[in-house]
Image (tube, rainbow, N blue to C red):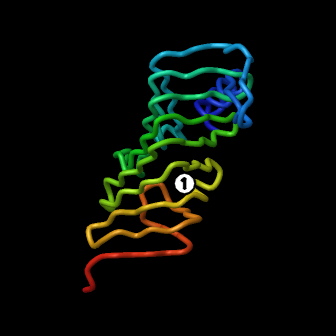
Amino acid sequence: MSKIRIVLLIFLFLLSCKREREPGKIDTRPVDKTIEKFEVVETIKGKMLWRLCAERAYVYGDTTLICDVHLFFYNTEEETSSVLTSDSGYVFPSGDMLAKGNVVVTSMESGRILKTEILSWEQERGKIVSKESVTIITENGVIKGNAFESSPNLTEIKIREVRATGEEK
């Protein structure tokens, strides 16, 4: 495990985030820490895998709530392969993340654009996943469906209940 990853995991463990609220319940726990211009980088053997930036982060125990999220994924040449944006999200000690609200993933490699309301980054598997409805915009049309899974650059896509519109070639 790289030194950066160990530092990241320790940092995230020390940080905390607001858990999902039950409808009608108000979270009254105080914020442990507020961080402006939050940024975390994941590397392996000196190669950048991803970079997470957020305007603000609120630490609650072992999870961090992030606002105005930009998550940059990098290819083996350390060029940006895709960018995930969302209104907010959560970072967990495992390195997993959950993006919420107006989630958009734009692939620089495939040209595809994914839109959904909730999307997870599964660190161990290296996959982005959503159980919500998703829309994928390609140069040839639009694909809609549910139960989505893909590589971050949107080149290896699995999707259920597919509906598509576009040009036939």
Query: The C terminus is located in which quarter?
Result: bottom left
11 or 161, which lies in front?
Answer: 161
Q: Is residue 133 left or right of residue 123?
A: left
Badge 1 marks a residue whose secondary structure is strand
Residue at 42% across, 62% down: 135
Q: Position of residue 22 (x, y in %)?
A: 74, 36
Q: Residue furthest bottom?
A: 169
The amino acid type, in three-letter code, at marker 1 is Ile
Residue found 57% across the figure and 56% down from its top: 130
Q: Residue at x 53, y 70 (%)?
A: 159
What is the quadrant of residue 29 in the picture? top right
Q: Nearer the viewer, residue 85 or 156?
A: 85
Q: Position of residue 87 (x, y in %)?
A: 46, 35
The quadrant where residue 18 appears:
top right
Residue farthest to the front, as pictured = 24
Q: Residues within 10 Å of mark 1 (few under 14, many from 20)?
A: many
**Vertical position of residue 165 compared to residue 60: above or below:** below
Residue on which the image places disc 1: 128
Please indicate whether residue 106 sits to the left or right of residue 139 in the image: right
- In the displayed structure, would residue 101 be above or below residue 167? above
Residue 144 x %, y % = 44, 68
Q: Nearer the viewer, residue 22 or 54?
A: 22
User: Which quarter of the rendered picture does the N terminus lie within?
Assistant: top right
Residue 60 picture location, percent across and down = 70, 22
Is 167 situated above or below 44? Answer: below
Q: Which sits in the foreground, 152 or 115? A: 115
